[in-house]
Structure formats: structure tokens, C-alpha cells
Image: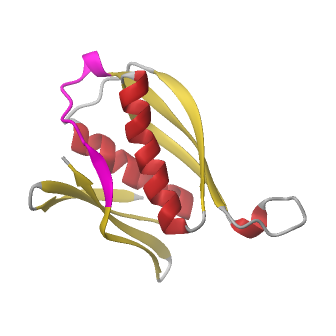
Amino acid sequence: MSYALREHTADVAVEATAPTLGGLFEAVADGLTAASCETVPDAGDRFELAVSAESREALLFDFLDQLIYERDVRLVLPADHECAIVAPDESGSGRAEATWTVEATARGVPLDAVAAREIKAVTYSEMRLERRDEEWYAYVVFDV
């Protein structure tokens, strides 16, 4: 799994690939962390979050939006992401669910321990999330 930061006018974009959808969410979230600061110290405690949405694209958007929210509320920079994706037909309830879910953890690095650039929001502008051959691909633009 990998990501790269891309210039995007006054914004910043993350381009990522991974063999699994969960790995892709982790890579994009790690890209968000890298867009926020150049170095991430080892400090911070892990926290959990879960997000649900009606599609994979909406799930990625809502997950990244939740990470920005967690940063603002907890005063931490989420880092070292771990994600598990539950597809609509994998709920285990015996019936198809209409939502996708990401169950995730991140390490919350205290903001006073980093020189962080503020990422204001995730955008749908030019967002792509797709399967390419044997891997997943995403391109996400963040408003800075």
C-alpha cells in the first residue's frame, strides 16, 4: 500500500493504491497525516472510530471527514491508521445491509507535539475510488 501527495492549485491531493479496500483507506488516511505535517512523533494513544455510508465513495469521504473532526475535537493528529471495511452483504445478519462501514483505529498524536498544517476539509472535487487490475486506487483532494 502506498500514497503520494500531489499538488492541486491551492489545495493538496492524495493519490493512493493498495491491494485491499481497507488498505486503501489506510493509505489515504496516512496521506492526510503526511499532508498535515512533515514528521510524526511516536507519541499518542490509539482510539477507535466507525463510520457508515451508502457507497464506497461516500464512506471514504465520511471517514476522512471524521478524522478531521477527531483532530479538531480531540486536539490530536490521527496517524498510523488501521481499517477494516464491511461491505453491505458482509454484515453477518443474514440480510443485505444498505450501508458500507469502516471500523478503524488511529494513533492520536497530540497537536502540540507537531508543527501541523491545517487541512480544512476533504472534498468530492475530482475524487476517484476504483478497482484497477489487482489493486484499489484512490485520488482525494483536501482543502487547505
Query: Is 73 rendered above or below residue 55?
Result: above
- Write down the quadrant of residue 127 in the picture: bottom left
Is 120 magenta? The answer is yes
x 21%, y 30%: residue? 116
Across and down, in percent, residue 48 comes to 59, 33
Q: Quadrant of the N terminus?
A: bottom left
Q: Residue furthest bottom?
A: 133
x 47%, y 83%: residue? 133
Is 54 magenta? The answer is no
Across and down, in percent, residue 100 comes to 64, 61
Q: Please, which colouring scheme is shown? A: secondary structure
Query: Is 120 rendered above or below residue 57?
Result: above
Q: Residue furthest left?
A: 9
Across and down, in percent, residue 63 comes to 48, 50
Query: Is 8 rendered above or below residue 67?
Result: below
Start-end of magenta stretch: 111-123
x 36%, y 22%: residue? 75
Query: Is 74 rendered above or below residue 140?
Result: above
